[in-house]
Amino acid sequence: MTWVDDAPELAPYQDEPAQMASAAPGKVGLLRLAFEHRVDRTVLADLFRQAPLLVQQALYWDAAMPEMACVFLVSTSGGMLQGDRHRIDVSLGAGARVHLTTQAANKIQEMDANYAVQVQQITLGEDAYLEYLPEPVIPYRRSRFITHTAVTLPETATVLSAEILLPGRKYHRDGEIFQYDLYSAAVRAARPHGPDLFVEKFVIEPARFGVDRRGVLDNFQVLGTVLLLTSPERARRVFERMPPTWDDDLPLAAAASRLPNDAGLLYRVLGRETEPVRAQVREFCGVARAEAVDRPTPPAFSWR
């Protein structure tokens, strides 16, 4: 199993925790999910789980897509700890419809040694559709986290994946704004039996390279990223429906860019607070779903 431990940005963090060693039993979380389209719905046909990662069963709560399997990815550890190594493999058969989310924000806990890793392998069959929309990532003070996602899909399939990265525990005590050590994220997409479509990677090390500079984040603190991998025609229609946005009052900025090799779109949202960014991400995802499968997005659930 490849944990991307050889990434150069991890070189300063190779020390072992004084407690349980990195990748020791109990620190390697594994999930394998395989979905198939059967008759009138998508089913979770194969499941392997190893704590602290957990999945229970597929649910069918989306009234606009009752055939879609909706699955919560659960962590029993209260976040990612130093030395954790998580791997998630997801495969969708032809025509499958799947919504993946998490039960809570991914909290990257404070660290004094080593780092945490999450590797994701996503494979889609013809005409499959995946929404991977987890809750935000919150990197705590001195945390080090690296994630790598590899997606393989034909042109007829669609992946709609979103991530919202917070600057830390903004309202914890005196605030932990950009006090984490490292956040590294990479995504690679390819066609089956074909070359890579694109590779994107960004590394944030606030102590080494300040993120509050113009051309980086400036005065923004929350970063939303949506990856839409789909056919060129669908991507074109979404691009035309989602022009660049700038709102001085919130403040908020958002825009889509075309990915290489007609792979799809990358949509980025910058804001000061979480909810405006979440709302803008949701708007883009709603447009993308409508163009990909011609279904509306249900209204956001209100807890009030």
Image: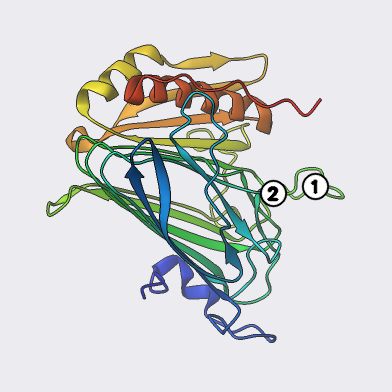
| Figure disc tally | 2
Q: For the residues labelled 1 and 2, say whether their Cβ atoms are less than 8 Å apart.
A: yes
Front in this rendered view, residue 20 or 40: 40
Secondary structure of residue under mark 1? loop
Residue at 51% in and 40% down: 133
Residue at 12% in and 51% down: 194
* 288 on left or right of 176: left
* Numbered mark located on residue 292 in the image: none
Mark closer to the chain start, 1 or 2: 2
Circle 1 sits on which residue?
A: 175
Looking at the image, residue 25 lies above or below residue 86: below
Looking at the image, residue 82 lies above or below residue 290: below
In the rendered image, residue 128, in percent from the top left (x then y), is placed at 30, 39
Crowd rating for badge 1 (residues with CA inside 10 Å; few <14, some 14–19, many 20+): few
Residue at 21% in and 26% down: 232
Front in this rendered view, residue 299 or 207: 299
In the rendered image, residue 137, in percent from the top left (x then y), is placed at 61, 49
Front in this rendered view, residue 279 or 213: 279
Secondary structure of residue under mark 2? loop
Looking at the image, residue 221 lies above or below residue 113: above
Circle 2 sits on which residue?
A: 168
**Residue type, numbered disc 1:** Gly
Furthest-left residue in this view:
194
In the rendered image, residue 214, in percent from the top left (x then y), is placed at 52, 33
In the rendered image, residue 195, in percent from the top left (x then y), is placed at 14, 52
